[in-house]
Amino acid sequence: MSNDTASAMDYNAHEQTYEGFINFSKVGTVAVLNIVLCLILFAFGGTAATVFGWLMLIANLIATAVGLALGEKGWIAPSAVFVLSGLLAILTV
């Protein structure tokens, strides 16, 4: 016998949770890739690369926080930091 006292599913809350998970996945993936680039700067670069690595690591933390707050287009801020970190890695390593 089925339970007729259960409430209906809240589809709006389900959609918001799903969109939040997808946004967190996108921003988190770009943030982790940026951390890998910073580790490359620390390991294989000289003094300038180490300084740039720390600056990009701090910028990554800020861009990740901004990206999580923005919502659907939140992956853009960490991606910009990722591109800048990649260019610095190419130039200094």
Image (spheres, rainbow, N blue to C red):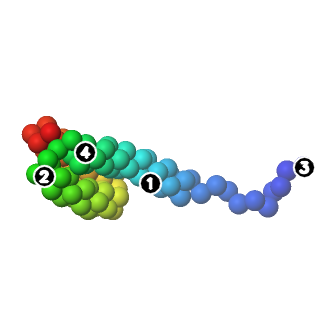
Q: Circle 4 is placed at which residue position? A: 43
Instruction: Tell me which label, 3 or 1, sits earlier in the chain.
Output: 3
* Residue neighbourhood size for the residue with mark 4, other residues' Cα within 10 Å, grouped as few (<14), some (14–19), many (≥20): few
Query: Which one is earlier in the sequence, the residue at label 1 or at label 2?
Result: 1
**Helix, strand or loop for disc 2:** helix
Q: Which is nearer the N-term, disc 2 or disc 3? A: 3
Can residue 83 be seen? no
Q: Are marks 3 and 4 in contact (CB under 8 Å)?
A: no
Q: CA distance from mark 3 to mark 4?
A: 64 Å
Q: Is residue 71 visible?
A: yes
Q: Earlier in the sequence, mark 4 or mark 1?
A: 1
Judging from the image, what secondary structure is the residue with disc 4 in?
A: helix
Q: Amino acid at mark 4?
A: Ala
Residue at mark 4 to residue at mark 1: CA–CA distance:
34 Å
Q: Position of residue 12 (x, y in %)?
A: 52, 56
Q: Which mark is residue 47?
A: 2
Mark 1: secondary structure: helix
User: Looking at the image, do the residues carrying marks 4 and 2 touch, with CB atoms under 8 Å apart?
Assistant: no
* Residue 11, x across and y down, in percent: 56, 53
Query: What separation in Å lies between label 4 and label 2 (alpha carbons)?
Result: 11 Å
